[in-house]
Image (cartoon, rainbow, N blue to C red):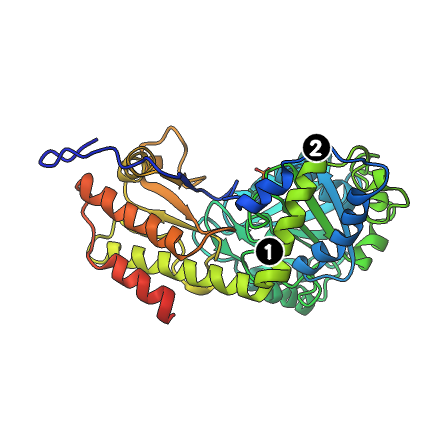
Amino acid sequence: MTHPNHPQPDLSRGRPYLAIPGPSVMPDRVLAAMHRAAPNIYAGALPDMVAAMWPDLRAVAGTAHHVAAYIGNGHAVWEAANTNLFSRGDTALVLATGRFGLSWAESARALGVSVEVMDFGKSSPMDLIRVQERLAADKGHVIKAVLTTHVDTASSIRTDIPALRAAMTAAGHPALLAVDCIASFGCDEYRMDDWGVDVTVAASQKGLMTPPGMGFVWFSEEARQRCATSDLRTPYWDWRARAQPTEFWQYWDGTAPTHHLFGLREALTMILHEEGLENVWARHEALARSVWAAFDAWGAGHSRIGLNVADPAHRSRAVTAARLGAPDATRLRDWTEHQAGVTLGIGLGMAAMDDPAWHGYLRVAHMGHVNAHMTLGALAVMEAGMVALDIPHGPGALDAAVRAMILG
Ligand SMILES: *Cc1c(COP(=O)(O)O)cnc(C)c1O
């Protein structure tokens, strides 16, 4: 589409930028590390490298306890967590703040877990008073585990995990706490042990900057013991040998994902040993702030445009969900992808895909291997698209984005 008064050249040539919440941008170093001949899987460099990687995987999660790895995506590690946590007929309480908690619940229900969902909608943080009341009412301690998302990637709501754990403690309830960190891992601050989390799940293709295909389940010693007899566990999903292998093949219950591992090694080095985890979190925070400031400026006087989550304390630092009014979100995404080389995320779960309102939502990812010029560039391209498409918007968004990024 071109502006009627100014036919535009194709501005999309150059390196494309996929700014969707996973798969995320992969560093060239990660890709280069994978470009090699097949390694010996019985001895030598690969087994040595993997043994040395497990402490790094624990460090990113903030745990001193166990980690089991799987060849699979996010859905795979939901199932891994569910089968190890539960026996048939056990009860799970799922706290949903968007789309992904509901999907984790569906996975558990399909396996034979009795699932109760507390759905807090698509734009608000969970109501921890209600959670506390619900747990306090479970006098027989039927609920074995609480499942939730740290960041729900559809709504971009971030849950205050320490506050959730405090509510569980205040209710005097012994349920295990299991958290989906697939969107937030390596982006948003997360401290599994300090925050009292029993099970954490994450996958390779978001903050870990590595191709889709590996997933991880970290679990506390408490979870290990209390789930020792879980009968939904099947041999492939069993976390026990994976977390404490005596032979190399047991890490993955079969052939290791050799090339993914070389990529992940490089990514962990970049995150932990070069940039440093706290700096990684601070970078995501600054990038997120710039995106929020841009939307606030675009939306001033234009109420069709706005962020999905009102309170910054409850917003993800990895992805931002926003509305632009239908059909302008879809028009803008099409323009930025085809005319400017930036692919933005679709709105997920905010409206049904066959509802015209669906075309009013989009998401901007700022997840993983992303720096200032990428996020500011994506925002500038969005503004260019609004100009090209005559989408009414407030002024000063780029200035506001720069100030928010630099001044906080
Ligand atoms: C991406 C994501 C998933 C699903 O991961 P897949 O690899 O697509 O199966 C689950 N939960 C959250 C929070 C996610 O961001």
Residue placed under numbered mark 2 in the picture: 37
Disc 2 residue lies near ligand 1 with CB under 8 A: no
Q: Residues within 10 Å of mark 1 (few under 14, many from 20)?
A: many
Element on which disc 1 rests:
helix
Q: Earlier in the sequence, mark 2 or mark 1?
A: 2
State the residue at coordinates (30%, 57%). Answer: 294
**Structural distance between the alpha carbons of marks 2 and 1:** 23 Å
User: Quadrant of the rendered structure where residue 356 is?
Assistant: top left
Residue 145 position in % (x across, y down): 71, 52
State the quadrant of the N terminus: top left
Residue that lies at the very extreme toward the top in this rendered image: 354
Asked if residue 183 shows in the view, the reply is yes
Nearer to us: label 2 or label 1: 2
- What amino acid type should be assigned to the residue bearing mark 2? Ala
**Quadrant containing ligand 1:** top right
Residue that lies at the very extreme toward the front in this rendered image: 37
Disc 1 residue lies near ligand 1 with CB under 8 A: no
Asked if residue 210 shows in the view, the reply is no
Instruction: From the viewer's perspective, tell me whether residue 217 is left or right of residue 384.
Output: right
State the residue at coordinates (19%, 40%). Answer: 388
Does 29 sit above or below residue 293? above
User: Quadrant of the rendered structure where residue 238 is?
Assistant: top right
Residue 335 position in % (x across, y down): 28, 36
State the residue at coordinates (55%, 43%). Answer: 100
Residue placed under numbered mark 1 in the picture: 270
Residue 179 position in % (x across, y down): 64, 53
